[in-house]
Amino acid sequence: MYRIHPGYLAWVLEGLVTGQVRNRVQVPASVADPARLALERMLAARPPASSGGSAERAS
């Protein structure tokens, strides 16, 4: 991600606003389906709740 230049990102996002999809990546369903599932799981994951106490850090 660090290689994405802000100007390039702006160009892609401006295209999306006007309905243009630039640099679409297409892969077979056998690759896309498991990847989509993994992304959904990552986006649904939440960090564990922290009590804010120092006892957790001490162990």
Image (cartoon, grey):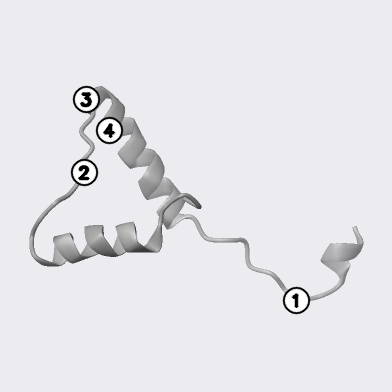
Q: Kindly identify which numbered label has been placed on residue 28.
A: 3
Q: Kindly identify which numbered label has been placed on residue 33.
A: 4
Helix or strand or loop: what does disc 3 sit on? loop
Q: Earlier in the sequence, mark 4 or mark 3?
A: 3
Front tag of 3 and 1: 3
Q: Earlier in the sequence, mark 4 or mark 2?
A: 2
In the rendered view, tell whether residue 53 sits above or below residue 58.
below
Which of the pair 58/18 is nearer the observer?
A: 18
Which of the pair 8/27 is nearer the observer?
A: 8
Dividing the picture into quadrants, the one containing residue 48 is: bottom right
Residue 6 place in picture, x, y as percent = 38, 63
Q: Kindly identify which numbered label has been placed on residue 6.
A: none
- The CA distance from mark 2 to mark 3 is 16 Å
Dividing the picture into quadrants, the one containing residue 24 is: top left
* Left or right of 38, for residue 20: left
Front tag of 2 and 1: 2
At 36% from the left and 48% from the top, the residue drawn is: 40
Disc 1: which residue = 52
Query: Could you tell me if the residues under marks 2 and 1 are in contact, i.e. CB atoms within 8 Å?
Result: no
Disc 2: which residue = 23
At 26% from the left and 23% from the top, the residue drawn is: 30
Residue type pointed to by label 4: Asp
Residue 23 place in picture, x, y as percent = 21, 43
Front tag of 4 and 1: 4
Front tag of 4 and 2: 2
At 16% from the left and 61% from the top, the residue drawn is: 16
Residue 39 place in picture, x, y as percent = 38, 45
* Left or right of 58, for residue 19: left
Q: Earlier in the sequence, mark 4 or mark 1?
A: 4
Residue lying farthest to the bottom in this orientation: 52
Residue type pointed to by label 2: Asn
Q: Earlier in the sequence, mark 2 or mark 3?
A: 2
